[in-house]
Amino acid sequence: MAVTINTLRDYKEKGEAFAVLTAYDAAFAQVVSEAGVDAILIGDSLGMVLQGKDSTLPVTMDDICYHTRSVAAGNRGALIMADMPFMSYGTIPDALENAARLMRAGAHMVKLEGTDWMKDTITALSERGVPVCAHLGLTPQFVNKFGGYKVQGREEKQAELMIEHASELVAAGADVILLECVPAPLAARITQAVQAPVIGIGAGRDTDGQVLVLHDMLGIPEGRKAKFVKNFLEEGGSIPGAIKAYVKAVRERTFPSEEHTFK
């Protein structure tokens, strides 16, 4: 049975964790969805893991649309979320046009990065039938404003503002909140504060769901990884086995552990 927004809401209501993973092509979309992943994210992370760029900023709408079509072709029932790339939603007309392109390509939901300035955009999308995931915390498209990839929300004032923004974005129509690289206690507070499902990456185990980049959880390429990454291929023994191990660990809330969590 296909996973929908209502499925994720039911998970939250029941206190059951769900697993999200990136994929960028039909073959991996099939493997990922058949291994039990609830939602697939076509992330603008493809700029780094597929294109070899040093950030997500060079990724275009054409790139995301192409990979969304590919994922949709191989998907076996997972919810498909597609990133809206840098400056593709700078104005409401741009957001509507580009979101429509992604939905036509096969997405079930679009993901936007930003804070309270996105409220009107989210409302406009929601009113026109486009489900939205709002991405808060470390938002990679803002890397040049942040001065690097840094944990967000460690100061109390910043933490309170993030809680406020999450609540405002859900009120504006956001169906899902994604938190990246925020202290676990803050992520837990936001998860409790909003009715929408909350997905975490580097946000502790108390969010409603977890997401990782496929290449990261397979240990590709070798070398230094972010604190929140775990190589599941080591215990899974194969790519399908690794994905199944990831899904199991998320659902049992054994991942992320303390070593993958920011305080």
Image: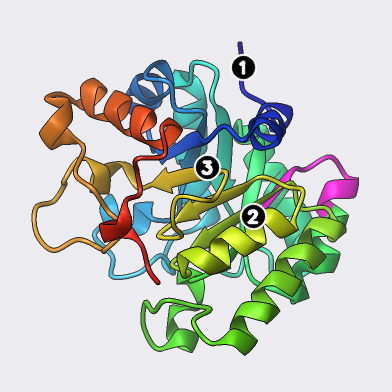
Horizontal relation, residue 215 to residue 143: left or right? left
Q: Which mark is residue 157?
A: none
- Judge whether residue 132 is colored magenta: yes
Q: Secondary structure at mark 3?
A: strand
Q: Residues within 10 Å of mark 1 (few under 14, many from 20)?
A: few
Q: Is residue 93 visible?
A: no
Q: Quadrant of residue 160?
A: bottom right
Q: Closest to the observer: 246 or 221? A: 246
Instruction: Judge whether residue 124 is colored magenta.
Output: no
Region of the chain picked out in magenta, as a range: 125-134
**Mark in front: 3 vs 1:** 3
Residue type at mark 1? Ala
The three-letter code of the residue at mark 2 reads Thr
Q: How is the image coloured?
A: rainbow
Q: Is residue 198 above or below residue 160?
A: above
Q: Residue at the spot x=26%, y=63% of the render?
A: 227
Q: Residue beneath label 1, please?
A: 2
Q: Residue at x 31, y 57 (%)?
A: 258
Residue 7 placement (x, y as % from top left): 67, 26
Disc on the earlier residue, 3 or 1: 1
Q: Secondary structure at mark 2?
A: helix
Residue at the limit of the structure toward the top, as seen here: 1
Residue at label 2? 191
Of the numbered discs 3 and 2, the one sitting upstream in the chain is 2
x, y (%) of residue 164? 75, 73
